[in-house]
């Protein structure tokens, strides 16, 4: 009875915010109309610009999908990833280098920079300016493909290919506008996408699920719909310190009854917890807001919570994005660093769609110059 009343209470709160959502819709719709009428201009560029974004606030898996496309193109093209560098402590246009940290370029950009040191990773809140800066680089450094991370609402740039992500567990057609929901713009904004990817799908997805989601989205003939999920890889030490225990193997930890303290600063940690709970009967979560900057109080609380776990066999598990913020944190004691591990994820496509998705991306980049000349 109590849980039902709590749900009812939340619904009433969200409903009370609907008038604000209507006002928000008027403002966002007017802005989009100015672009559609050409009063505000969207600029195109002479190289492929692939935008990855969503209609909602966070939690759809933009960075893993960005990394997937980088992996797909990195061996054949000079690739650059441009994002705004959310919550960084710097301003303007910056290109990542060996001195960069999550504080200077943002946690997601730093994660990509660490994983792909051979590509250009740049940040600029003004994407149009950022692209122009990248195209001004010397010929030997100038990118041949630019991937825009979280840029669906940045309409001053007209991407050559626009990819929209939506969470299978909360698709945009079931959501509401801020603040009563999580949508940053109305659902019809999805019409700007060339490709829509329904992310975080269950691996048991069936063709009938495809048809149901497709019908509910109401996509146009020019739009392709894909379904993806996440595959968790082996645990990796945050601080690159060797241990005598093969803690990277979750099966090993399960057999030896390890306890997990899970520390996250992501939008939706539920899927991660479900995965880890398969390998430990003692799993405790410290959940912080998305992109959370850990304070002194937070670090002390993490350390104390870990020390309070009575099981001698224990580790701290975090996400790759959180690891990007923790790796340079001098407040973590050296003797505790050996217990910090992150769990990388990779994107997999379901319903045998992977080859088709790869073909779409590769063909777009390969044929871009020819299509531009013909146009």
Image: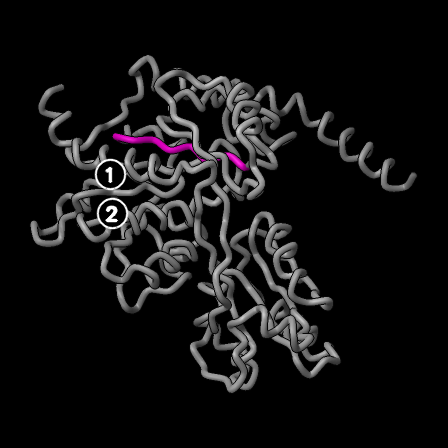
Q: Position of residue 173 (x, y in %)?
A: 57, 24
Q: Position of residue 149 (x, y in %)?
A: 37, 43
Distance between the alpha carbons at the discs numbered 2 and 1: 7 Å
Q: Position of residue 244 (x, y in %)?
A: 51, 87
Q: Residue at x 56, y 20 (%)?
A: 216
- Circle 2 residue: 73
Given contact means CB atoms under 8 Å apart, are the residues at marks 2 and 1 in contact? yes
Q: Residue at x 59, y 55 (%)?
A: 272
Q: Which residues are magenta?
A: 160-167
**Circle 2: is it few (<14), some (14-19), or many (20+) Cα within 10 Å?**
some
Q: Against 286, is 2 above or below? A: above
Image quadrant where residue 89 sits: bottom left
Left or right: where 272 falls relative to 53 = right
- Residue nearer the viewer, 10 or 3: 3
Colouring mode (rainbow / by chain / secondary structure / one colour): one colour
Image quadrant where residue 336 sits: bottom right
Q: Against 90, is 234 above or below? A: below
* Magenta stretch: dominant secondary structure: strand
- Circle 1 residue: 362
| Upstream in sequence: badge 2 or badge 1 | 2
- Residue nearer the viewer, 247 or 125: 247
Q: Is residue 165 magenta?
A: yes
Q: Is residue 310 magenta?
A: no
**Marker disc for residue 245:** none
């Amino acid at each position: 009875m109590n849980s039902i009343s709590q749900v009812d209470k939340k619904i009433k709160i969200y409903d009370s915010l609907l008038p604000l959502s209507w006002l928000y819709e008027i403002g966002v719709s007017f802005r989009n109309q100015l672009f559609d009428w050409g009063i505000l201009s969207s600029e195109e560029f002479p190289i492929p610009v692939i935008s990855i974004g969503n209609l909602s606030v966070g939690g759809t898996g933009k960075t893993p999908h960005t990394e997937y496309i980088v992996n797909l193109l990195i061996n054949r093209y000079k690739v650059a990833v441009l994002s705004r560098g959310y919550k960084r402590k710097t301003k303007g246009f910056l290109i990542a280098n060996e001195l960069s940290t999550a504080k200077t370029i943002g946690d997601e950009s730093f994660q990509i920079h660490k994983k792909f040191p051979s590509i250009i990773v740049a940040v600029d809140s003004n994407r149009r300016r950022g692209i122009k800066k990248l195209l001004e680089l010397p010929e030997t450094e100038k990118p041949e493909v630019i991937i825009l991370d979280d840029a669906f609402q940045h309409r001053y740039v007209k991407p050559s290919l626009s990819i929209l992500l939506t969470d299978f567990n909360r698709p945009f057609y079931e959501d509401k506008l801020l603040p009563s929901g999580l949508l940053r713009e109305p659902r019809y904004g999805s019409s700007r996408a060339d490709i829509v990817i329904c992310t975080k799908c269950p691996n048991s997805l069936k063709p009938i699920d495809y048809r149901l989601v497709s019908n509910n989205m109401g996509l146009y003939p020019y739009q392709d719909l894909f379904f993806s999920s996440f595959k968790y890889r082996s645990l990796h030490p945050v601080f690159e310190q060797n241990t005598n225990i093969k803690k990277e193997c979750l099966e090993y930890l399960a057999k030896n009854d390890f306890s997990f303290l899970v520390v996250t600063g992501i939008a939706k940690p539920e899927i991660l917890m479900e995965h880890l709970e398969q390998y430990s009967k003692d799993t405790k979560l410290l959940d912080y807001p998305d992109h959370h900057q850990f304070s002194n109080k937070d670090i002390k609380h993490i350390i104390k919570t870990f020390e309070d776990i009575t099981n001698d066999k224990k580790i701290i598990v975090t996400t790759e994005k959180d690891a990007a913020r923790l790796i340079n944190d001098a407040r973590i004691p050296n003797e505790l660093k050996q217990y910090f591990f992150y769990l990388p994820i990779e994107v997999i496509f379901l319903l045998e769609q992977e080859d088709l998705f790869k073909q779409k991306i590769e063909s777009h980049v390969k044929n871009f110059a020819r299509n531009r000349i013909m146009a």
